Image (cartoon, rainbow, N blue to C red):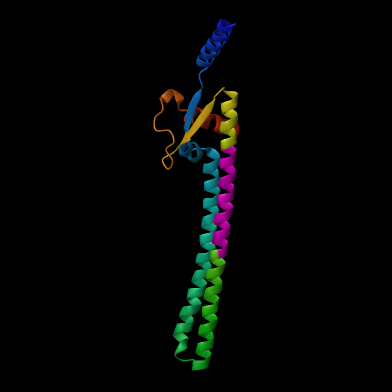
């Protein structure tokens, strides 16, 4: 009976040693930054940013013209009128600055939300890729957080996953 127990333990140890974990890693930064959907997202937001800048450059130029006009006329105005016009211009400047800040924050928030959604989709894809291809672990690394300090080229899944990601999710 004792021998059967030892043989069972030995067989269990032998079979568990035979099944080796399949481990790979990806460079998360490269995976995200070279993903075509991210490039497309950045291009779309770059167009939006240019429109935003153009809009506020136009508003800024119009304000500057009005301010210069006031400066040219201020010496010829009654002090009370000049003070009132100065206050109006100051308020107008504050409104422009606040509007610009609010729109810039909205723009940044919208971009961040889209990037976060994209990252979640990439993580899900890597998870599914790992399951489909029999990986026990797929580790992530990047310049910012080097969790994999060394890995052989054969275990680097960045390129195959990036290719599959760009192929499936066009």
Q: Quadrant of the N terminus?
A: top right
Q: What residue is rendered at 51% in x and 22% in y? A: 22
Please name whichever residue, 155 or 73, is drawn nearer the observer in this view of the structure: 155
In terms of image quadrants, where is residue 84?
bottom right
For the image, the number of numbered tags is: 0
Q: Position of residue 3 (x, y in %)?
A: 55, 5
Furthest residue toward front = 2
Residue extending furthest toward the left: 150
* The one of 125 and 164 positioned closer to us in this rendering: 125
Q: Position of residue 122 (x, y in %)?
A: 56, 37
Question: In the rendered structure, which segment of residues is drawn in magenta?
Answer: 102-122
The dominant secondary structure in magenta is helix
- In front: 88, or 8? 8
Q: Is residue 109 above or below residue 86?
A: above
Vertical placement of residue 64 versus 102, above or below: below
Front residue of this view, candidates 65 and 152? 152
Q: Residue at x 55, y 29 (%)?
A: 164
Which quadrant of the figure contains the C terminus? top right
Q: Is residue 82 visible?
A: yes
Residue 170 shows in the view: no
On whether residue 10 falls in the magenta region, the answer is no
The reply to whether the magenta stretch includes residue 111 is yes
- In this rendering, the answer to whether 103 lies above or below 151 is below
Residue 92 in the image: state x and y as whole percent.
55, 76
Left or right, 131 with reference to 83: right
Name the residue rendered at 59%, 53% in the picture: 110
């Amino acid at each position: 009976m004792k021998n059967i127990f030892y043989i069972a333990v030995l067989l269990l140890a032998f079979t568990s040693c035979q099944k080796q974990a399949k481990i790979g890693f990806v460079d998360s930064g490269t995976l995200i930054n070279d993903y075509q959907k991210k490039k497309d997202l950045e291009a779309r937001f770059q167009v939006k940013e240019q429109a935003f800048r153009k809009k506020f450059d136009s508003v800024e130029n119009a304000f500057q013209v009005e301010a210069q006009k006031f400066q040219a006329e201020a010496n010829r105005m009654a002090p009370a009128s000049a003070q009132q016009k100065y206050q109006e211009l100051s308020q107008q400047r504050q409104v422009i600055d606040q509007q610009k800040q609010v729109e810039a924050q909205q723009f940044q928030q919208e971009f961040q939300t889209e990037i976060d959604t994209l990252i979640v989709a990439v993580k899900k894809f890597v998870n599914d890729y790992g399951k489909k291809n029999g990986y026990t672990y797929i580790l992530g690394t990047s310049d910012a957080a080097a969790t994999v300090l060394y890995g052989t080229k054969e275990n680097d899944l960045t390129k195959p996953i990036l290719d599959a990601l760009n192929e499936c999710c066009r």
